[in-house]
Amino acid sequence: MDAYYKSLLNKNKAWVAETLSKDEKFFDKLSEGQQPPLLWIGCADSRVPANQIIGAEPGEVFVHRNIANLVVHSDMNMLSVLDYAVNVLKVKHVIVCGHYSCGGVQAAMTNNSYGVIDNWIRHIKDVYRFHSEELDSIKDENDRLSRFVELNVVEQVYDLAKTSIIQQAWRNGQKIEVHGWVYSLANGIIKDLDVSFSNDSQLEETYKLNL
């Protein structure tokens, strides 16, 4: 057996032992069900583990991750997670969390082809097109990438608010807020982009659904 693979199983046993030493009822309580207050939509990047960077315990965060933390309205995976989180788990907050130096966002700044992922990256390129005037005015490439990461998160937050799932929840009187964050790999700090929705009043009329 590969040494690295075997080490994963050994680390699991060590984690279980350490967890039980702190709370012998931990897994009994965890197996009773989940009622997380938060849905996290984040990047698949291995350096951005949702629970760990916000100090959350198992059971606190319902997680969906994809390349560059996108909210694509035709993505049945994301929509299914969102629907379950909102309508079954009754989460109170949905957070889109991007991260600086995101490879997916960086790829969207180029004309390089990466294979199948080109179809996914096109959605990020749309964000650049929406904000091309601002982004093109930023001369430093690293600064431009950082701002592009932020704007990508902002657009995904807006796209969440446009979904029938979120709007129906608001219409039903459900208290749910949508937020946008960016995580720094360099220092571990999360930046709140101060973009959030708690109802559809901030949406343009075009996107308000008659539900």
Image (tube, rainbow, N blue to C red):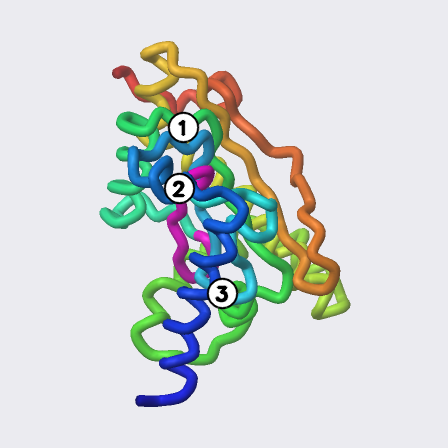
- Distance from disc 3 to disc 1, alpha carbons, whole Å, reads 24 Å
Residue 125 visible, this angle: no
Q: Nearer the viewer, residue 5 or 152?
A: 5
Disc 1 packing (10 Å; few <14; some 14–19; many ≥20): many
For residue 145, what is the image quadrant?
bottom right
Q: Nearer the viewer, residue 147 or 55?
A: 55
Q: Earlier in the sequence, mark 3 or mark 1?
A: 3
Q: Secondary structure at mark 3?
A: loop
| Magenta-colored span | 59-69
Q: CB under 8 Å between callouts 1 and 2?
A: yes
Disc 2 packing (10 Å; few <14; some 14–19; many ≥20): many
> In the image, what residue occupies the spot 43% across and 57% down?
16
- Distance from disc 3 to disc 2, alpha carbons, whole Å, reads 17 Å
Query: Disc 3 designates what residue?
Result: 45
Query: Disc 2 designates what residue?
Result: 62
Image coordinates of residue 83 in percent, x first then y, are 28, 34
Between tags 3 and 2, which lies in front?
Answer: 2
> In the image, what residue occupies the spot 35% across and 70% down?
117
Q: Earlier in the sequence, mark 1 or mark 2?
A: 2
Q: Tag 3: residue type?
A: Asp
> In the image, what residue occupies the spot 50% across and 31% down?
178
Image coordinates of residue 206 in percent, x first then y, are 38, 25
